[in-house]
Image (cartoon, rainbow, N blue to C red):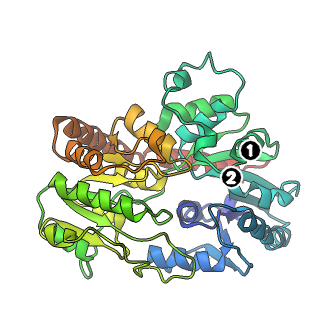
Amino acid sequence: MASNSNSNVVVIMVPFPEYGHQIPLLRLSQLISSYNIPVHYMSVGARNHELKQRQQQQQHPNIQFHDLSITSKENDEENYMPYLESLLQIREPLSAICHSNNDKRVIVIHDAIMQFVVETVYTMSHVKVYFFHAVSAFTTYSMLQQIKENNEDDSLFTSLQGYIPSIESCFKPGMEELTKMLRDCKFKRGEILNSCRETEGRYIDELCKQSATPFWGLGPFNPVNIVRNSDKTHRCIDWLDKQPVNSVIFVSFGTANSFSIEQIHEIAIGLERSEQRFIWVLRGKDKKGEKVGDSIEKMDLPNGFEQSVENRGIIAREWVPQLEILAHRSTGGYLFHSGWNSFLESASMGVPMATWPLNSDNPYNDVLITKVLKVGLVVRDWVNKNELIKHEIIESGVRTLMDSAEGKEMRNRAIELSRAIKKSVGDGGSQKKQMDTFIAHITQDD
């Protein structure tokens, strides 16, 4: 796989310093480095440390981590501008690395959100820039269609227009302007997606048609074949070993989200009354500086709840091995926030989904999951995003997914999707072909 033609190329990764954005670019770094191309991975030092700690992988051959010491503000949901402005401190060390490699072809791959940070190196003659989208091809395509003046001739978009949410309802102010800037940027050499043709081929094709530069679906970046660690297993895995096949629903809403006590109570009652086995990851929103794996905060549950579900449910307030849980034969469903990384993991393992979109790209993914791929059902409709979701709705969604003919059809479609994804990352699969094409593009002379 190594080639002498790659010796004059160096890649610099600039992720948005949040876990869900960092992990795909770390995995892309590993893929690129396997072609004998050195990779510099630049991010806030504490976030890099957290990333490696969560991944439980300390060895990254041919990847050099740059742990930047910057004064970073908290990413406050109400006022995020101070946090974004603090990231401008990345500009100077990024420029320094680019200048120190001025005898090489420097490839900068940056999270699309980081355009305002990276744009100072765009005009360096030896630097070539590629955007990375941490969202799905479907989300990217839908947002680009929404900022176009006329979509009447696009049947692929108009057929779903009644379901696709507005940019304004999903993202913080300024996303529409950022989308236009990314679309119109004259310095980009191409754009990368953590996706594959088997999942989103038609949308990747549309993006390629509408763009002057290439789009590559190089994903999925998550492992698709899980090797079990026989020396040390998590208690959730030990418990799953004792459950029937496809009998457990995994409930987790990501590390960047939190619920009110009232909503937690409704989820608890819904799970209890569904009479289904479950693993519920019940943690507070991750806070910078907390040790990974700590129970971040105790959640109040209805009186007697834990005792009533003791024999058929697990409440996990600690870190859990999500991929191992989704890959386990006893896991038959996933109730989650429709996050893109989590979707790819669930789809890779053939697990059907119950969706509860919370913010940003989640509502777009919800449409892809339930209306396009049809491997899941809606529990919390985005239209009702400001309402308390009652336990009756949760109970019904869980029962339908886990114990109905409709749920079985979704499971069968999810299994077929999983087979296609696993084939795509195998020898001769589409991912290898896409990666070869991408590597050829970044290493070729102008």
Q: Which residue corresponds to mark 1?
A: 182
Asked whether the viewer can see residue 14, the reply is yes
Q: Residues within 10 Å of mark 1 (few under 14, many from 20)?
A: some
The image position of residue 342, as x and y in percent, is 42, 55
Q: Residue at 40% of width from left, 32% of height from top?
A: 371
Task: Check the picture and name the quadrant holding the N terminus.
Answer: bottom right
- Using the rendered view, name the quadrant where residue 151 is placed: top right
Horizontally, is 333 left or right of 83 in the view? left
| Number of marks drawn | 2
- Image-based side of 282 in relation to 148, left or right: left
Residue, disc 2 = 112
Image: 236 above or below 2: below
At horizontal 51% and vertical 64% (from top left) the residue drawn is 256
The quarter holding residue 376 reads top left
Image-based side of 98 in relation to 250, left or right: right
Image height of 67 relative to 442, above or below: below
- Of the residues under marks 2 and 1, which one precedes in the sequence? 2
Label 2 residue SS: helix
Quote the CA–CA distance across marks 2 and 1: 7 Å
Query: Left of 396 or right of it: where is 216?
Result: right
Q: Amino acid at mark 2?
A: Ala
The residue lying toward the viewer, choosing from 18 and 75, is 75
Q: Residue at x 11, y 67 (%)?
A: 242
Give the SS element for disc 1. helix
Residue 375 in the image, given as x and y percentages of width and height: 33, 40
Instruction: Give residue 407's position: percent from left, percent from top.
Output: 22, 40
